[in-house]
Image (cartoon, rainbow, N blue to C red):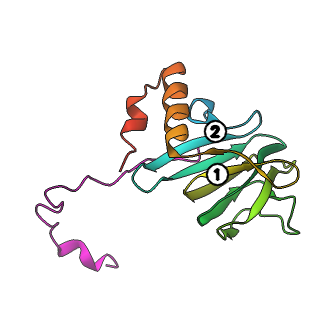
Amino acid sequence: MTEFWRSLTPIENSLRPDALPEVYLSKVATDEDKYYVPFTETVGSRPLWINVKDNSWADILRAKEAGLVNRHYHPHEVFAYTISGKWGYLERDWVATAGDFVYESPGEGHTLVAYDSPEPMKAFFIVKGPLIWLDGNGDPVGFFDVHDYLEMCRKHYDEVGLGAHLIDELLR
């Protein structure tokens, strides 16, 4: 028997008095369009976890064909793991494919693109802090933070019949 832990019993009262349970979502990289909030005209975001206090979120970013997320930089770090398809930054010489990990340093400006690929581009992101939108010269022209993300997600989930309450259940 390889599951040696089968004789253990679960911890009673495993959550501290003020703790919230984990967020468990099954099959998060689904192809069902309704779960992807339009982030730009060509890229959608599937929210997985949202933290207002730290201005951060986790999502699956998806482009079903060639796509673009507007030029921006992050004043905080960002982590990405590629699930399928191909994506990268116009400013860099690498192309991320399934299984690739990307760490974005704070203050790094880039233009995220999804390349043509037989599979949709899907990447798991952990975004810390806002996105600072940039113009073609790299100068700031606006921002997008967790409050904008929440509003966008709640509106979309209501419009497609999932209900904003599903977004509220992701808050931790």
> Counting residues from the N terminus, which is met first, the one under dot 2 or under dot 1?
2
Number of marks in picture: 2
Q: Tell us which disc is closer to us: 2 or 1.
A: 1
Describe residue 145's horizontal placement relative to residue 143 as left or right. Answer: left
Relative to the observer, which residue lies in front, 119 or 127? Answer: 127
The answer to whether residue 25 is magenta is: yes
Q: Residue at x 76, y 33 (%)?
A: 41
Q: Position of residue 60 (x, y in %)?
A: 60, 49
Q: Main secondary structure of the magenta part?
A: loop
Q: Secondary structure at mark 1?
A: strand
Q: Position of residue 85 (x, y in %)?
A: 77, 53
Q: Residue at x 89, y 69 (%)?
A: 93
| Residue with the mark numbered 2 | 31
Bounds of the magenta span? 1-30
Q: Label 2 sits on what residue type?
A: Asp
Q: Secondary structure at mark 2?
A: loop
* Residue 94, quarter of the rendered image: bottom right
The answer to whether residue 55 is magenta is: no
| Residue with the mark numbered 1 | 131
